[in-house]
């Protein structure tokens, strides 16, 4: 995701999507101009021309036609500021892509040969000569068009911004008051933004450097978020493949089982296959929905990253400061955007065959016998009391939940999948060796929760681990300390029990 932050990359500049993203209104697809079609930057960092913005805006609500995000626009100038760098970008692209179509700003029928950096205008050879003779412009910097074609940044295309309230004054200062936060001129500082009203000023150069540094740091942070999203997408895609592979594997198992039962349960077979497909489809759809949501967030980050990356490359500080708050708000919003760090579903379902043939006559009406567990490890837990004692039976209450915190069992009773759930209680010794304790598992009453019963025979570190088809869904660590020595007759001390926090998996679902 990282790019060169001083130049505009050629592969980006000459891509087909570049004009649509940066030079054209995202609603009407017209190129931006200086009039009512000038560019306005939305909080999502997409842009609209001013005409379309007013057309789409309903009261104080504005929905971006690109990403469909709805923005509240109470203060139009602050929420959707004018983007003064867009014109320079358009002229930069025109010089790079179609230099022969560049005409003199004063004599539109003549080809431009130079560009005045201060006036931000293209000049033909005659106008260039006149420009050098007039006292008001003879000190201006004139750049040849041929040299501009080789230029890799926008420095020569920066529009010279003047104060909108005092057109003869440069934007040399920046007001830091929260309600203001914009470049101002000396006259504004003396008349409108006085220190008495809490309008504290700073030089625009130093403030732009400070904001530029902060924006670069946000870009770096977003780069890490983007990488994390990419890893989660890879995990989701892997789990999707596992779901599809397991679906095929279970289908094969169903076929092998039903080969001996076709005369009795031919109709039930189709119902079972349908149930399996629904299960796999539900899991696949959940993973697909998560992937689409992550890709949407990744796309928003990618677009905002590129947009912000482009703007920090400019040295036109007043122009940058006019839009930096919008860029900064968008980057902060995306950086704080919550998303689950592991796939919402696991490939955890199957088809039970144990004792099926002998029970088929009495159980045929209870088919399908497919099972599914949509356990999402961050929402699964194991609960137990605080008075764990050696040589005394202990009971854990295991709650399996999906990514929506609903019961993880889908259309199944716990008894139907109990044998597919692998439960282990391990004890670690001083030399880090482990042994497995005997334990019993059963359902809790009429619920779909699981009880795990075991009796600790040793002190030390213990781990309760719940797996479904070798996928960890619960991992609970706790410690039982040795019994205290007896200091008084007929008295004893209970072992101290330290319970750690329930295991929820790390950012990618890897065991902690």
Image (spheres, grey):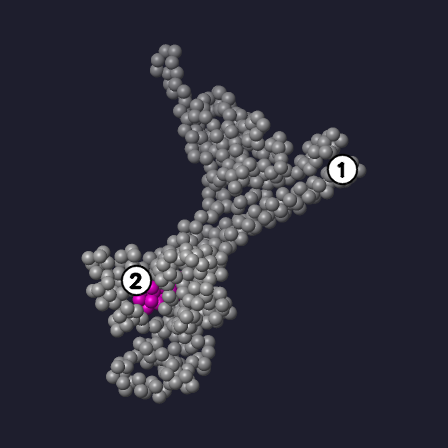
Against 147, is 368 above or below? Answer: above
> Label 1's element?
helix
Residue that label 2 marks = 182
Q: Is residue 129 on the magenta stretch?
A: no
User: Main SS type for the magenta part?
Assistant: helix
Taking the spot 29% from the left edge, 59% from the top edge, the residue there is 180
Report the quarter where the N terminus lies.
bottom left
Label 1: few (<14), some (14–19) or many (≥20) C-alpha neighbours in 10 Å: some
Taking the spot 35% from the left edge, 13% from the top edge, the residue there is 488
Taking the spot 49% from the left edge, 43% from the top edge, the residue there is 510
Q: Is residue 22 left or right of residue 350?
A: left
Find residue 239 and report its horizontal and vertical position in percent. 57, 47
Residue most extreme to the right: 263
Find residue 316 and report its horizontal and vertical position in percent. 32, 68
The answer to whether any part of residue 196 appears in the image is yes
Q: Is residue 427 left or right of residue 311?
A: right
Find residue 237 and report its horizontal and vertical position in percent. 56, 51
Magenta stretch: give its range. Answer: 308-322
Foreground label between 2 and 1: 2
Against 244, is 409 above or below? Answer: above
């Amino acid at each position: 995701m990282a790019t060169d932050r001083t130049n505009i990359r050629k592969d980006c500049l000459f891509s087909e999507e570049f004009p649509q993203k940066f030079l054209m209104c995202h609603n009407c697809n017209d190129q931006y101009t200086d009039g009512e079609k000038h560019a306005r930057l939305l909080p999502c960092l997409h842009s609209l021309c001013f005409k379309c913005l007013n057309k789409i805006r309903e009261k104080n609500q504005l929905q971006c036609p690109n990403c469909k995000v709805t923005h509240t626009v109470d203060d139009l100038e602050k929420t959707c500021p004018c983007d003064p760098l867009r014109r320079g970008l358009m002229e930069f692209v025109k010089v790079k892509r179609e230099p022969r179509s560049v005409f003199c700003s004063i004599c539109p029928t003549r080809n431009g040969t130079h560009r005045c950096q201060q006036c931000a205008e293209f000049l033909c050879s005659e106008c260039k000569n006149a420009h050098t003779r007039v006292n008001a412009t003879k000190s201006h910097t004139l750049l040849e068009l041929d040299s501009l074609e080789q230029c890799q940044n926008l420095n020569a295309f920066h529009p010279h911004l003047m104060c909108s309230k005092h057109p003869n004054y440069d934007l040399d200062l920046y007001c830091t008051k929260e309600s203001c936060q914009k470049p101002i001129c000396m006259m504004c500082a003396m008349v409108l933004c006085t220190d008495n009203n809490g309008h504290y000023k700073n030089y625009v150069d130093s403030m732009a450097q400070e904001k530029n540094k902060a924006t670069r740091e946000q870009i770096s942070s977003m780069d890490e978020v983007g990488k994390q999203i990419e890893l989660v997408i890879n995990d989701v895609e892997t789990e999707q493949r596992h779901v599809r592979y397991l679906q095929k594997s279970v289908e094969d198992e169903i076929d092998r089982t039903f080969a001996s039962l076709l005369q009795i349960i031919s109709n039930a077979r189709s119902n079972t296959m349908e149930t399996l497909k629904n299960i796999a489809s539900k899991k696949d759809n959940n993973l697909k929905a998560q992937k689409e949501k992550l890709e949407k967030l990744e796309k928003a980050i990618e677009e905002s990253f590129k947009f912000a990356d482009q703007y920090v490359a400019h040295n036109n500080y007043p122009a940058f400061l006019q839009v930096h708050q919008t860029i900064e708000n968008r980057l902060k919003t995306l950086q704080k955007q919550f998303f689950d760090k592991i796939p919402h579903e696991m490939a955890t379902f199957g088809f039970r065959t144990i004792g099926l043939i002998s029970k088929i006559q009495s159980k045929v009406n209870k088919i399908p016998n497919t099972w599914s567990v949509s356990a999402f490890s961050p929402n699964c837990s194991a609960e137990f009391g605080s008075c764990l004692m050696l040589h005394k039976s202990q009971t854990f209450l295991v709650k399996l939940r999906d990514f929506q915190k609903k019961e993880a069992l889908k259309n199944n009773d716990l008894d139907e999948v109990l044998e597919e759930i692998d439960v282990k209680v391990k004890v670690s010794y001083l030399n880090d060796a482990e042994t497995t304790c005997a334990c019993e598992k059963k359902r809790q009453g009429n619920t779909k929760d699981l009880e795990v019963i075991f009796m600790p025979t040793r002190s030390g570190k213990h781990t309760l681990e719940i797996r479904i088809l070798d996928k960890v869904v619960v991992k609970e660590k706790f410690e039982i300390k040795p019994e205290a020595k007896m200091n008084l007759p007929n008295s004893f001390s209970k072992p101290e029990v330290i319970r750690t926090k329930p295991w929820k998996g790390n950012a990618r679902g890897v065991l902690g």
